[in-house]
Image (cartoon, rainbow, N blue to C red):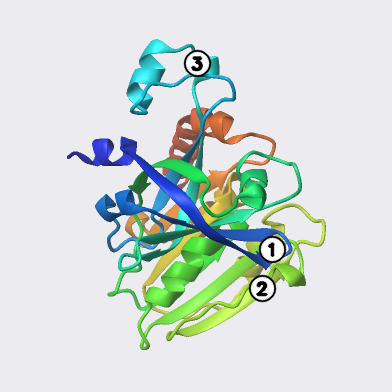
C-alpha cells in the first residue's frame, strides 16, 4: 500500500469514552477492531482526517471517498477535519483525539461535545511527518491549542537527557494542561486574554534566551503567527529547513476546506519570499 493509499483508507471506529480536559478541550477516545490495521509509527504529529457525512446524502456501501468524489456533486461530499492523534494504545486498540470546543462554533467541536460511547466514527489516515531528532542539542516546541496534542506527545517521547524549551498559548489559565516528560523541559504557558492568536507566542520566542547548539523545532498553529515565527527562525536566526517542522494548522477566518484549498499557494509565496531574503 502506498503512502497516499494509506492516508486515503477509511477506518470505521466507535467512541469508547470522552473526557472534559479543560473548559474548552474535550478528549474523545476511539476504539474498534479496524484500528488494528493503522500504521502509527515514530511520528509524534500523526493525524487523521475525521469524516463528517452530509445530512440526508446517501453514500455508497462500503464507504469510498474516491467514488464519492467521482460520482457525486461537490456539495454532497462529506466534510473532513484534520486532528492530531494525542495518544495511541495498540494493546487496547484505543486512539485519543483532543478537540477544542467553543459552543456551537465549527463542526468537530460540537460533535465531540455530543459524542457518546458507541457512536460511530469514520476517518482517513494516519499521516504525519515529525518526530524529535535524537541528534539535536535541544528542542523548541511552539504552538496554540491546535498544536498542543502533538507537543504533549512529543514531550512524552523525549528522553531524560533531552533539553526542550516549550511555548504554548491558550485562551486563559484554566485552559492549561498537565504535560508529562522526563526531559529537561522549560514549559511556558501564555494566555491570550482576548488578544490575537499567536501574538504572545511570537513575542515570547523572540525575547527568549534559548540554549546554544543545534535545535530541532516544531512550530504549528494559526497560519499568521506561524509565518512570523518562520521568518524569525529561518531568516533572522538562520535555522535550516531540516531543523524545522513548521506549518499553519489553520487560518483565522477560514474553515478547514478553505484553508486546505489556499494552503499550497500560501506556503509557496512564503518560500519565495524566504528565498529572496536568504539569497
Tell me the quadrant of the picture where the N terminus can be found: top left
Q: Is residue 261 above or below residue 36?
A: above
Q: Along the line of sight, which residue is nearer the eye, 45 or 213?
A: 45
Q: Position of residue 156 (x, y in %)?
A: 42, 76
Upstream in the sequence, badge 2 or badge 1? 1
Q: Residue at x 74, y 61 (%)?
A: 171
Q: Quadrant of the C terminus?
A: top left
Relative side of 202 to 259, left or right: right
Which residue corresponds to mark 1? 170
Judge depth for marks 3 and 1 and give the one in front.
3
Q: Residues within 10 Å of mark 3 (few under 14, many from 20)?
A: few
Left/right placement of residue 192 relative to residue 209 reads right
Q: Earlier in the sequence, mark 3 or mark 2?
A: 3
Q: Residue at x 52, y 18 (%)?
A: 76
When asked about the image quadrant of residue 229, the answer is bottom right
Give how far across and how far down residue 192 sits, in percent: 76, 61
Cα–Cα gap, marks 3 and 1: 35 Å
The vertical placement of 264 against 216, above or below, is above
Residue 43, numbered label: none
Residue at the farthest right position: 194
Q: Is residue 232 visible?
A: no
Q: Which residue is mark 2?
A: 189
Task: Check contact, mark 2 vs mark 1: CB within 8 A.
Answer: yes
Give the mark nearest the N terminus, 3 or 1.
Answer: 3
Residue lying at 48% horizontally and 30% vertically, measured from the top left? 265
Q: 10 Å neighbourhood of mark 1: few (<14), some, or many (≥20)?
A: many
Front position in the image: 258 or 165: 258
Q: Residues within 10 Å of mark 2 (few under 14, many from 20)?
A: some
Q: Position of residue 85 (x, y in %)?
A: 44, 57
SS assignment at label 2: strand
Which label is found at residue 74? Answer: 3
Amino acid at each position: 500500500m502506498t503512502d497516499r493509499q494509506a492516508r486515503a483508507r477509511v477506518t470505521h471506529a466507535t467512541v469508547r469514552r470522552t473526557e472534559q480536559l479543560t473548559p474548552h478541550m474535550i478528549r474523545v477516545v476511539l476504539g474498534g477492531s479496524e484500528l488494528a490495521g493503522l500504521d502509527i509509527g515514530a511520528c509524534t504529529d500523526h493525524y487523521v482526517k475525521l469524516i463528517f457525512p452530509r445530512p440526508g446524502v446517501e453514500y455508497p456501501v462500503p464507504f469510498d471517498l474516491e467514488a464519492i468524489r467521482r460520482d457525486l456533486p461537490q456539495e454532497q461530499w462529506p466534510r473532513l477535519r484534520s486532528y492530531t492523534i494525542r495518544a495511541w494504545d495498540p494493546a487496547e486498540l484505543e486512539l485519543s483525539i483532543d478537540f477544542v470546543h467553543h459552543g456551537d462554533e465549527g463542526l468537530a467541536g460540537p460533535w465531540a461535545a455530543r459524542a457518546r460511547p458507541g457512536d460511530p466514527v469514520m476517518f482517513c489516515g494516519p499521516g504525519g511527518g515529525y518526530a524529535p531528532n535524537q541528534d539535536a542539542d535541544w528542542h523548541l516546541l511552539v504552538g496554540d491549542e491546535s498544536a498542543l496534542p502533538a507537543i504533549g506527545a512529543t514531550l512524552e517521547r523525549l528522553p531524560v537527557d533531552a533539553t526542550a524549551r516549550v511555548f504554548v498559548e491558550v485562551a486563559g489559565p484554566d485552559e492549561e494542561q498537565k504535560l508529562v516528560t522526563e526531559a529537561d523541559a522549560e514549559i511556558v504557558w501564555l494566555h491570550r486574554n482576548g488578544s490575537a492568536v499567536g501574538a504572545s507566542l511570537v513575542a515570547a520566542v523572540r525575547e527568549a534566551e534559548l540554549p546554544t547548539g543545534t535545535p530541532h523545532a516544531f512550530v504549528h498553529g494559526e497560519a499568521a503567527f506561524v509565518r512570523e515565527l518562520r521568518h524569525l527562525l529561518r531568516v533572522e536566526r538562520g535555522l535550516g529547513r531540516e531543523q524545522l517542522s513548521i506549518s499553519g494548522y489553520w487560518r483565522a477566518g477560514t474553515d478547514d476546506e478553505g484553508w486546505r484549498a489556499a494552503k499550497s499557494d500560501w506556503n509557496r509565496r512564503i518560500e519565495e519570499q524566504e528565498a529572496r531574503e536568504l539569497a
